[in-house]
Amino acid sequence: MPHVTIKHFPKHLDEPQRERLVARLTEAVQDAFDVDAAVISIALQEVAPEAWDSEVYQPEIAARPDLLAKPPRY
């Protein structure tokens, strides 16, 4: 039962962009885990730029480097 969460800023995605992203992510996850698309869940969460460090970077990136499949370059 794969679940993907994408936290992002600064771009707001309109509905067609969200649909394309979800479709592509679903296809990639389905292929990687060999599961039916119906069992995949995807959350898209906008984060305010001023909250990025405290809500995302520190707790999820800096504190958990062992879980990063792809670290950022910033």
Image (cartoon, grey):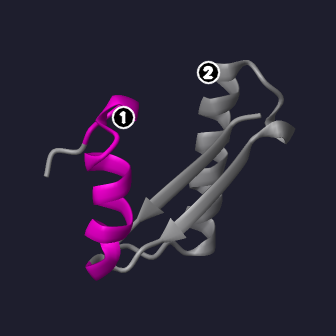
Residue 68's disc number: 1
Say which quarter of the image contains residue 9.
bottom left
Residue contact between numbered discs 2 and 1, judged by CB atoms under 8 Å: no
Q: Amino acid at mark 1?
A: Leu
Q: Report the side of 29 relative to 13 (left or right).
A: right
Check disc 1: other Cα within 10 Å, few if <14, some if 14-19, many if 20+.
Answer: few
Name the residue rendered at 86%, 40% in the picture.
38
Residue at (63, 52) in percent of width and height: 22
Does residue 25 appear to the left or right of 1 in the view shown? left
Q: Position of residue 1 (x, y in %)?
A: 77, 34
Q: Residues within 10 Å of mark 2 (few under 14, many from 20)?
A: few
25 above or below 8?
above
Mark 2 vs 1, N-terminal side? 2
Q: Identify the secondary structure beneath mark 2.
A: helix
x, y (%) of residue 43? 63, 58
Q: Which residues are magenta?
A: 50-71
Q: Which residue is mark 2?
A: 32
Q: Tell me where residue 55 appears, x and y as whole percent.
A: 38, 68
